[in-house]
Amino acid sequence: MRVLSLLLLSIQLTKTVASNVGERKLTTTSIRRELNKPCRLMRRSDDEDGARTLYCELDPQDVDGVAGIIYPIEGCDGDDVTKPIDGTLLFFVTGYYVEDNTIYCPSGVKPIYDTASFSASGSAPSSFTEPASQTGEQTVLMIRAIFADSAPTLTASELSEEAFGTGGDTFTMKSQFAACSYNAFTIQEFPTSTINSRAITDGVYETTLASTATGMTGSQLQALITTQLDLELGTNWRINNGIELVMYCLPPAADSFTAYAFIPGFLSVYSNGWCATPTGQMHEIGHNLGLHHSNEGGVEYGDTSGLMGSSYLQDDSPKMCYNGAKSSDLGWYSNREETLGFCTEALNRQLVGVDDYGTSISGTHIVVLKIEKDCPTCDNVFVMFNLASGINEGTQEGPNKVMITTEATEGDFSFLVAELDATTTSYSYTGDNNGIPSTTTITVNSIDLGSTPSVASVSVTCGPNLTTAPTVTTASPTAAPVTITTTAPTPTVNPPPITNAPTTPTVNPPPITNAPTTPTVNPPPITNAPTTPTVNPPPITNAPTTTVKSGKGSKSGGSNSGSSSSSGSSSSSGVSKSGKSSEGVVFTRSPTVPGVKSGKSSKGRRI
């Protein structure tokens, strides 16, 4: 009887899909299904319509026992919930229902949100599985979905090789997760065995569907696959077999998207070639772990220093980890993370990159410096040394610089607001210190790439509030110049060249004046400092504003509730990235990658 019911559900989904082709919605052929249980709220990383829609995982009791059915919510009063979507928040509306792969609510009925037993709904939910954990070993099963008109280009064995390294591949999402987390978070493919008498080999299961994929959206294909798997692998197959993460690999006919995942959750979905890219897989599973995108200025995905920015259609590069905000969210370096109050006394800290975490010294080195917000409109600020070496050698932005990112709440969108080095030496932002406006300044004193481990020395100071618009100034002439020393070759990711600062401060350094509140007419041009220090150089006035990375609000790239400024002279490495393309850096894909034409170039993609 249950098999017949599931077949009817599958037919319903197929009819709904057919009715939506060509933007037609024939509700008379769709089956309206009343919902009696709360559903679990989540978000999708890359909505097909670009909206920030809420999604809900339905209680299996409402869909014939099928676990993992997820639909978007539309037309519900108050559905743009501002509460944290952390995997525990449930949603219920009396009389709500599913139709056309969408959850709808009766007009005028307010939703109920609850995290407890949900007694307010009058019907306690079935138990939902927890989202994937940010630590520990996670068992993963990849689904290769074969449709009547299209199949993924890569075979099951090739997918296993690219994701898990079962054939000897040394750079995969499995290897890189272990490397970036120092084995705090590890991926283990589901072993070769059977589930419900169905064979699974090296972490990959193949399912064949009678439907065609052409013309369907990722959401529609996802619903069909989920129902099919329940028929083939049995009720609650994922929970009963201890599978924490599931990856759907869809065929090329589903090219209306690249990849997406649910935040937080267990499911990620990939279109064809994206099934085999380590950066794409780590980006989407990062969403399952509760992470949102890494942005810069007004550009979503714009911070390409870490994995939650743009991704790359390549199977053997780039090697990178997560930025400072996301690293703090994940907690993998918690014994090398320091948290400060918003405004502190002056202090100095020695930062090391993630590649040197294993050799760092407790009490001497830190990986992440977090400065907490202390007002509702402020953001948390994160300071991290983006060392371009080893497991992070492929970072696509700010190599060997001190990166400043902000984040309103844990797991929220992060924003890159400054990249500090010998050129741009400090970053200041204003906030609220116990009701008194104040300014916090983060300064890079030196970057030593030749030491073991490589170290960036930074200081944090608290001073009077900025009363005028922020200005860009040079370092104090009485202080020792910022130096970057190195004995290592330039990283292979083509970062801006780094030259040694002069070992002897320049004679009679130029006087420093505050930028006027009203720009002067025809200011003298600013040129890069000569490679040989000169005596009595011309005074510097009105440093260009393009070195400032700023904005307002956690959704638009603001650092905090007040204004911010970066300190240093103008150079190509210090120019604001607020208007740069989110497509990332262009790379040529390895011709050995199955399913991609030889020589095809790929860009960082929003997924």
Image (tube, helix red, strand yellow):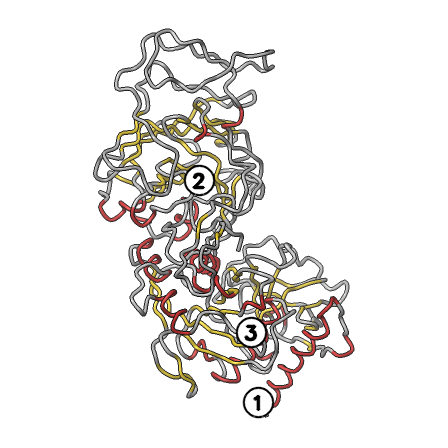
Of callouts 2 and 1, which one flags the residue occurring earlier in the amino acid sequence?
1
Q: Position of residue 417 (x, y in %)?
A: 48, 36
Q: Which of label 3 and label 1 is nearer to you?
A: 3
Give residue 555's position: percent from left, percent from top: 58, 44
First-in-chain label (2 vs 3): 3
User: Which residue occupies the foreground of this view, 418 or 1?
Assistant: 418
Q: Which residue is mark 1?
A: 3
Look at discs 2 and 1 and give the one toward the viewer: 1
Question: Label 1 sits on what residue type?
Answer: Val
Q: Is 476 left, or right, of 77 in this rendering?
A: left
Spatial CA distance of label 2 from label 1 is 54 Å
Quarter where residue 38 is shown:
bottom right
Q: Which disc, if any, is residue 73?
A: none
Q: Is residue 363 above or below residue 168?
A: above
User: Does 408 sit above or below residue 267?
Assistant: above
At label 2, the amino acid type is: Glu
Corner quadrant of residue 194: bottom left
Residue identifier under label 3:
150
Residue 397 rendering spot, x and y as whole percentages:
43, 41
Tell me if label 2 and label 1 are in contact, CB under 8 Å. Answer: no
**Residue that badge 2 annotates:** 372
Q: How far is disc 2 from disc 3 in space, using C-alphas?
A: 50 Å
Depth check: give the residue in front, 182 or 256.
Answer: 256
Secondary structure under badge 3? Answer: loop
Picture quadrant of residue 19: bottom right
